[in-house]
Structures are given as C-alpha cells and as structure tokens.
Image (cartoon, rainbow, N blue to C red):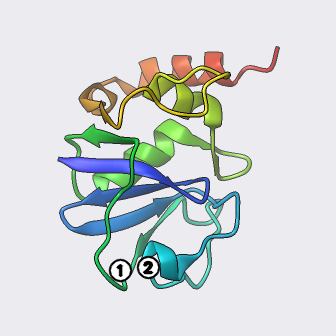
C-alpha cells in the first residue's frame, strides 16, 4: 500500500520504498529536516512530479492517504487528481474533499485515511468532480 501526505504544500508519495514529490511546493522546505536531498529544480509545469532522493529514514507524516496504486503510476494519478494545470500547485479544495476536511478545519479527522477508491474512480468522473470543485463562484 502506498502512502500519500503533504510536504511544504506539495504532495509527498511513498510507493515501494520510493518517494515522489507531486506539484510545486508552496512554502520553503527544510529538505534536511524532511530527510531528502534538495531537488535541483521543482517546476510542476514542466514535470508534475519528481523522484526524491532520501538522505535518511523517511516516512510520510500524518494525516496521510493509503492507496493501492503503486509505482510511477501513483504520482501520475496524484498529478491528475490534485494539480491545478495552470499553476502546477496542489488544489487545497480537492485535497480537503478527499481527506474529509472542511474549509473551517485545518486538521484532518483521521491520521490514516483509506483512499483506495481514488485509484478506482474513472478519469471522466473525476474530471466532473474537479470542474465542480474548482469552479469559481
């Protein structure tokens, strides 16, 4: 099972011992404290995800999603699900929808969130959800 959490406003995904950063970071990241080598370049408009090089024991913090999708398919799925194409940033609205948070909540209700369904939703259906959630009112 893969684990998916947040790191500096981007998404951190762990699958089969590999770590991926999905999307642009939104705040400065202390890569040493996160136990990763700093990436040379983060530009999700050019590359929506990149593989991170661990510099110590790593773990995806809580709250985090648990998903059955593994390998490089996972960061591709996460980019399709969560990234805003024009900015390369993670949509907070979509993240809150998946984690069950409301706009008033800053914390997820659970430490581990079962999100197996996220890998099973057809792309066409998720596109309708994305358009609805991201629509400006």
Say what secondary structure mark 1 lies in.
Answer: loop
Please say if the residues under marks 1 and 2 sit with CB atoms less than 8 Å apart. yes
Mark 1: few/some/many CA within 10 Å (<14, 14-19, 20+): some
Q: Which quadrant of the view contains residue 45?
A: bottom right
Quadrant of the image occupied by residue 102 = top right
Residue at horizontal 54 percent and vertical 58 percent from the top: 48
Whether 60 is drawn above or below 110: the answer is: below
Q: Label 2 belongs to which residue? A: 36
Which residue is pictured at 33% across the width and 30% down the height? Answer: 118
| Residue 78 vs residue 54, the one in the foreground | 54
Residue at 82 percent of width and 14 percent of height: 137
| Up-down relation of residue 87 to residue 97 (above or below) | below
Q: Quadrant of residue 54?
A: bottom left
Residue 25 locus on image (x, y percent): 64, 61
Residue 10 % position (x, y): 56, 55
| Label placed on residue 54 | 1
From the viewer's perspective, tell me whether residue 5 is left or right of residue 88.
left
């Amino acid at each position: 099972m893969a684990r998916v959490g947040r790191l500096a406003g981007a998404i951190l995904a762990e699958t089969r011992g590999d770590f991926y950063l999905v999307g642009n970071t939104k705040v400065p990241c202390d890569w040493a404290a996160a136990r990763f080598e700093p990436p040379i370049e983060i530009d999700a408009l050019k590359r929506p995800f990149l593989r991170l090089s661990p510099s110590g024991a790593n773990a995806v913090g809580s709250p985090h999603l648990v998903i059955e999708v593994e390998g490089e398919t996972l960061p591709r799925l996460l980019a399709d699900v969560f990234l805003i194409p024009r900015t390369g940033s993670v949509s907070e609205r979509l993240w809150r929808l998946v984690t069950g948070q409301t706009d008033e909540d800053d914390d997820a209700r659970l430490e581990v969130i079962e999100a197996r369904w996220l890998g099973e939703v057809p792309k066409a259906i998720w596109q309708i959800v994305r358009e609805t959630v991201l629509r400006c009112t």
